[in-house]
Amino acid sequence: MDDKVKFQIEFVIQSSPQLLYQYLSTPSGLSEWFADNVNSRGEKFTFIWDGSEEEAKLLKRKSDEFVKFAWDEDDDGSFFEMKIIVDEITKDVSLFITDFAEEDEVEESKMLWTNQVSDLKQVLGSS
């Protein structure tokens, strides 16, 4: 198996950290932009796209700051994390994504995140 490479991507989001966190950490919030449907039982989240299901475990979370998940089929130490960063001076809110992908799929993964976050911005009414 190829080693996955870590990549990070940042998006400026016009939203309060509290509201943004609800869309990153709850099944109903994630269903609005990340997947067609999301269910959770405890730390186990089921993401549904076009009838296919992916299971992820919630590894860590800190209210209004970040959520970190690992896909069940990935036992290689990879994860994806969505972190909310507020600029101390300007108070601008950024969503900082950390994810892993096969080396030849990094650009495709970044595009996927860009599309997903575009949906999130639409839901939030952020331009």
Image (cartoon, rainbow, N blue to C red):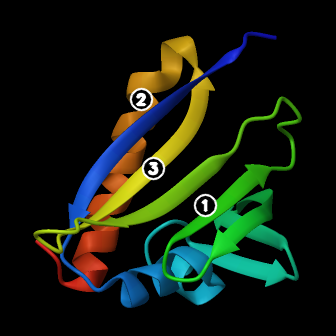
Give the residue displayed 50% in from the left and 73% down from the top. 65
Whole-percent x, y for residue 127 in the image: 10, 71
Q: Give neighbour class at mark 1: few <14, some 14-19, many 20+ (Cα, 10 Å).
A: few
The disc labelled 3 sits on which kind of residue? Ile
Foreground: disc 2 or disc 1: 2
Query: Dot 1 lies on which element?
Result: loop
Q: CA distance from mark 2 to mark 1?
A: 19 Å
Which corner quadrant of the image does residue 38 belong to?
bottom right
Which corner quadrant of the image does residue 12 belong to?
bottom left
Q: Where 26 falls versus 88 (above or below)? A: below
The disc labelled 2 sits on which kind of residue? Glu
Q: Where 17 falls versus 107 (above or below)? A: below
- Which of 56 and 64 lies nearest the eye of the viewer? 64
What's the mark number on residue 50? 1
Residue indicated by mark 2? 108
What's the mark number on residue 97? 3
